[in-house]
Amino acid sequence: MFLSEPFVSALGYGLWVGILVSLVAVIIAHLNLYALLSLHVKRSSMMPLWIMGLSVPVFIPYTVMALVVFLWFYPSGFIGSFFSSLMGSTLGLVLAYSIKTGAFLTLVGLPTLMASNPSTWVQYRLHSQSLFGFFIHVLMPKLWASMVVGMYVIHAYVLGAYEIPYLIGSRLTPMPSILIHDTFHKLAIDSAQRAYGMSGWLVFVMLSLVPIYYLLYRLIDKRLKP
């Protein structure tokens, strides 16, 4: 009863969007962490400013971020006309979430980077190795435990999130939270019961992601270890 075809389709779409957002967040995080590593080994004064800039989108509530994204994508003016094509698209959802999740995942991996001693890089450089090689072979294996945990948090959140899909998502391919919301507000006797049942399945799917991400971590950890 609760696993209707529209709900299964919405779950699949939500899982797909969550995967895309997690992957984009990982790419953004690694680019930021590599830039921060470069500043760290140079003991640059720009590093605190970079970290402060990353903290801004993280501490902005998602409701405010959703409103900002909506104003960006709303088809009015030059900028709005450029972004309006992203309204209701998967790309629009991914970009909207990536504003916060990329910064969040960077800050998740930041303690690992800060724990690395610049003298370790100096020793690594004596063997004619580049900073990029140091990042790939030394720092990245230490980062992936926190990265995978952060990816799970992002994936589970995107799967159940409501604000951004409600403002810029498509009703033709809704996220699970939107379908549950619309079902709950239908004028039918069993609408609330169906919405509660779908919410239970949504939570079950979120929890089912835990062993999947644990296996992903074990696989990556095995490959990255020398």
Image (spheres, grey):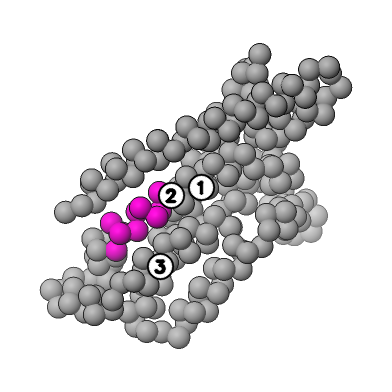
Q: Does residue 82 show up?
A: no
Q: Main secondary structure of the magenta part?
A: helix
Specify which label sits upstream in the sequence, 3 or 2. Answer: 3
Contact? badges 2 and 1 (CB < 8 Å)? yes
Q: Quadrant of the N terminus?
A: top right
The amino acid pointed to by label 1 is: Val
Residue 225, x across and y down, in percent:
20, 52
The amino acid pointed to by label 2 is: Val
Picture disc at residue 111: 3
Which residue sits at x=54%, y=68%? 54
Q: Is residue 112 above or below residue 67?
A: below
Which residue sits at x=52%, y=79%? 49
Picture disc at residue 149: 2
Q: Is 141 part of what is drawn in magenta?
A: yes
Q: CA distance from mark 3 to mark 1?
A: 18 Å
Residue located beneath label 1 in the image? 153
Instruction: Give the quadrant of residue 35.
Output: bottom left
Instruction: Give the quadrant of residue 189.
Output: top right
Which residue sits at x=66%, y=62%? 60
Residue 66, x across and y down, in percent:
71, 53
Of residue 75 and residue 224, the one placed in the foreground of this image is 224
Residue 175, x across and y down, in percent:
65, 34
Q: Residues within 10 Å of mark 2 (few under 14, many from 20)?
A: some
What residue occupies the far top of the structure in this picture? 1
Residue 169, x across and y down, in percent:
69, 40
